[in-house]
Amino acid sequence: MGKIEWAMWANEQALASGLILLAGGIVGVAGQFRGWEFAAYAVAAGVFVCLLEYPRGKRAKGTSVERTGQYCFTVCVKAFGPLTRNYYVRAFLHAAICVPGGFMLATVLGCVCLGIASLIYLAAAIRGEHWEPILPRKEVRKPVAESIKNPPQNPPPRPPPEMRRKQAKDLESAAYDNPIPVTSDE
Amino acid sequence: MAVSLRSWVANEGGKHLVLMLWLGANTWLFLNTFLLFSTGQQYHYLYKMLGVGVCISRASASVLNLNCSLVLLTMCRSVLTFIRGTHVVSSRKTRRLLDKSKTFHVACGIAVCLFSVVHVSAHMVNVVNFSSRYSDDFPALNLARYRGEDPKWIILTTIPGVTGVLLVLILLLMLISSSYCVRMSNYEIFWYTHNLFIIFYIILMMHMVGGVLKYQTNIEAHPPGCLRPNQSSTEQYVDDLEQLEDDDSRCKADAHFEPHYPQTWLWVSGPLCLYCVERLYRCIRSSAPVTIVTVIRHPCDVIELRMLKKDFKARPGQYIVLNCPSVSSFENHPFTLTKCPTVNKETFGIHLRVVGDWTERFTQQLLPQSRMDLEILPMVQQRTYPKLYIDGPFGSPSEEVFNYDVSLCVAGGIGVTPFACVLHALLDGWRGFRLQRLYFVWVCRELQSFYWFAELLCALHQKLWEENRPDYFNLKLYVSQVDNIQSISEERFRPLSSRMLVGRPRWKHLLDEIGKSNRHKRVGVFCCGPKGISRTLHRLCNSARSRGTTFEFNKESFS
């Protein structure tokens, strides 16, 4: 479990929570239910969270897949520098944003989901991850490997044939280490 | 290119038929339950109190019941392997449908999420109506304790409310972590959150406890809409007064309400038991460790592992799942078998490509470390291999290669592994199968990759030439990296070097050529490789063929 990048999951969860918060807020305002001011706040908060979370960060290892049209969002989010790079800031920001959503029935689901996203961001921050923008860059061609110049003249030393032959009755103990590494010739 | 109707029906017809049946079943359930609740006599008072909300919520609940049970059935892999293997389902067309079980699982999962949204919204409206339209005539029907009770409290203090909130949370977690990018980047997050389904099902079985929605049991004694003995209907006109004296419109007894019997148990418990039994069976079957016989290192980061296990039987094309506790206790990784155990030789093998941390750590435990000092010859030491458990074998689409008259196998890189097993089986005895001709196309980025199976390919080629069937096996190798061109120089691999081409294959011409030599036949196309190749091939198989050959596309994917 050591190499999991939590930030990717936190990003998906936060984007989904933003959408749910937005939807709940729209329903609350449209139906003019009791406490519809919280729903109006949820609409604004949902839009903000979606805009913040739309650009995906670059993965530390492996290929990063961009979301469609995320380049302009990446530029905007990058402009805030350390505020958006650091995941502790995002964790606390989401925790703070989600609290007013809990006061109205229509937005309570968005509030809980955003809370979960904030916890996952906290886990990512504790692991030392940070947000890197995905920017287009030129590919550097790998230099061509050198060909083998001098093949060895003698075969590698091997143990005597009795040790090399596999004992059919006892397969487990017939395994041995070759003194010099041998690769398959096929 | 134009889509030909016959090719499209041959390739896509079965899948779309099943899709239509499933949609039809869902629609029928929805409409049936909706009409039952809106027009049924026993729900008359409930409908009057809650309105259309109760109809929508119950209708979506019945659709949810169906999809929750289907979702489990598609994941019983051993059962599906058994169905595929025993030819109980004798038609090849129906066996082809089993290939799409994961897609169907995803479709049912999405249906569960969509209808949960509908169900939750309708129940929110119901809760508001329970509170505002509190019924003084029929107190047994009420969920709220008094008129105007806060809907939030109604939800949080009843079992269906609390379980519903938990179910929605778990469902959301499972949905969001099943997205494509999370699965590709961190498969463990997807796996561990998806295993919350067990909690989901347990809470689902408790969801209906409490009997929130009630139906009326004594319809004959108390026809809905009848008038109480001390009640007069103010809407009636004076000259209809004599109708009021009619016995039928007077209630003989008070309305009596009973809560529903929870239907979810009937739908869900069967598949859940089947799934649990299957997991137990797989656990017991994989509890015997395997003996590792040989570890061979191949070029381009590929390791071949030969193993031995008692009573292990597999068919060509199947895959196994490896678990090595010394590398990671909970991770299970699937690998296709490249050699099946036969009557003569009981060892079976896999080829695994080292990409990712599990395979790296596994390889480090299997192969000796490189020694730093080479001047002093070290002693030969005994090596102990790590303990390894395998689960399987599980079926895959490539098992059908032998059931066509003509088959085309297209492999990209390490995707050649299911077909390697097929070739081994042909080497053992090629006469017993329905297969009369096999076209084998292997596309690799580097030349070194062909050394993984160079001996196998040459041996099969040699055997078929000697037994006077040179047209049985048609081999085409492609090296897709066009710079730094090399060739296979060994004399014993002559058949390979003379069949190797540089550059990407032209699929349309290939299929045309195969179609020309096999008119009016059904050719099975099996693809195991990158998405680009499989998409192109799929499109070509669906498009018009002028020579009467039909190409049936079967894809095997490793994700």
Image (spheres, rainbow, N blue to C red):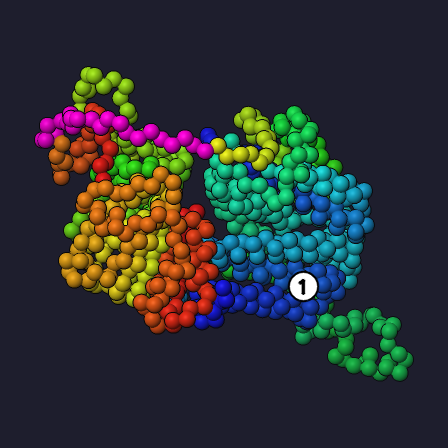
Instruction: Please name whichever residue, B204 or B157, is drawn nearer the observer in this view of the structure.
Output: B204
Q: Is residue A156 magenta?
A: yes
Instruction: Residue lying at the far right in this picture: please name it.
Output: B238
Q: Position of residue B206 (x, y in %)?
A: 56, 51
Instruction: Please name whichever residue, A161 or A11, is drawn nearer the observer in this view of the structure.
Output: A161
Q: Secondary structure at mark 1?
A: helix
Q: Amino acid at mark 1?
A: Cys
Within 10 Å of disc 1 (Cα), the crowding (few <14, some 14-19, many 20+) is many
Instruction: Please name whichever residue, B202 or A96, is drawn nearer the observer in this view of the structure.
Output: A96
**Residue that numbered label 1 is attached to:** B55
Q: Position of residue B163 (x, y in %)?
A: 60, 48
Residue A93 in view: yes
Q: Quadrant of residue A50?
A: top right
Q: Is residue B7 magenta?
A: no
Q: Residue at x 30, y 41 (%)?
A: B486
Q: Residue at x 53, y 26 (%)?
A: A127
Q: Residue at x 57, y 44 (%)?
A: B176
Stretch of the chain drawn in magenta = A141-163
Chain identifier of the residue bearing label 1 in the image: B
The main secondary structure of the magenta stretch is: loop
Image side of residue B552 versus residue A111, left or right: left
